[in-house]
């Protein structure tokens, strides 16, 4: 039942995503690295969930994250950022606060689409290989 509560509350946030979240990461290479690494990180929630303090949106978000466990060391390694763990923790706060990172190891779908489009543009920008010269 507690598992269902976690998933239910998280799904409410996923159903009400805001596209403006993309603006937080758009011009920040370190945030982009962290977001990409987040999707490859082992993220779990507590087996025994803490009691929830309230029903407001902010209280629900805090409750979800209060019941989430992940390794900052693993995140630092996978993101390839040169920060101490305390600095990395402060760097992920805006990503959590703006609901870019989700406490199940996924990310905001608008951010995901933005990153995919950016990657596709990188492939399009590569020069095409020249075939054999016609003589």
Image (cartoon, rainbow, N blue to C red):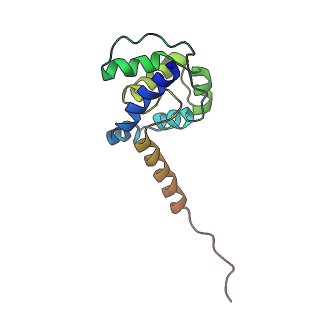
Residue at 57%, 32% in the rendered image: 79
Instruction: Find residue 53 and report its image quarter.
Output: top left
Q: Classify 8 as above or below 117.
A: above
Q: Position of residue 20 (x, y in %)?
A: 32, 40
Residue at 57%, 16% in the rendered image: 47
Residue at 37%, 25% in the rendered image: 97
Q: Classify 106 as above or below 48.
A: below
| Near-viewer residue (104 or 81) | 104
Q: Position of residue 55 (x, y in %)?
A: 32, 18
Q: Position of residue 27 (x, y in %)?
A: 40, 41
Q: Is residue 37 left or right of residue 55?
A: right
Q: Classify 128 as above or below 35.
A: below
Q: Classify 15 as above or below 62.
A: below
Residue at 37%, 20% in the rendered image: 60
| Near-viewer residue (59 or 132) | 59
| Near-viewer residue (71 or 86) | 71
Q: Is residue 129 left or right of residue 33?
A: right
The residue furthest left is 56
Q: Is residue 39 left or right of residue 9?
A: right
Instruction: Find residue 129 and report its image quarter.
Output: bottom right
Instruction: Find residue 95 and report its image quarter.
Output: top left
Q: Is residue 101 left or right of residue 127?
A: left
The residue furthest front is 1
| Near-viewer residue (135 or 42) | 42
Where is the C terminus found, in terms of image quarters? Answer: bottom right
């Amino acid at each position: 039942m507690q598992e269902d509560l976690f998933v239910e509350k998280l799904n409410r946030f996923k159903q009400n995503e805001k596209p403006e979240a993309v603006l937080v990461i758009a011009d920040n290479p370190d945030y982009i690295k962290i977001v990409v690494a987040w999707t490859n990180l082992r993220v779990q929630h507590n087996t025994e969930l803490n009691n929830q303090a309230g029903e407001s949106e902010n209280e629900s978000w805090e409750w979800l994250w209060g019941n989430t466990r992940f390794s900052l060391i693993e995140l630092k390694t996978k993101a390839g950022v040169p920060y101490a763990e305390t600095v990395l923790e402060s760097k992920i706060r805006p990503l959590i606060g703006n609901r870019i990172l989700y406490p199940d190891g996924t990310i905001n779908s608008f951010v995901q689409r933005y990153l995919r489009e950016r990657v596709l543009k990188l492939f399009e920008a590569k020069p095409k290989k020249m075939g054999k010269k016609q003589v």
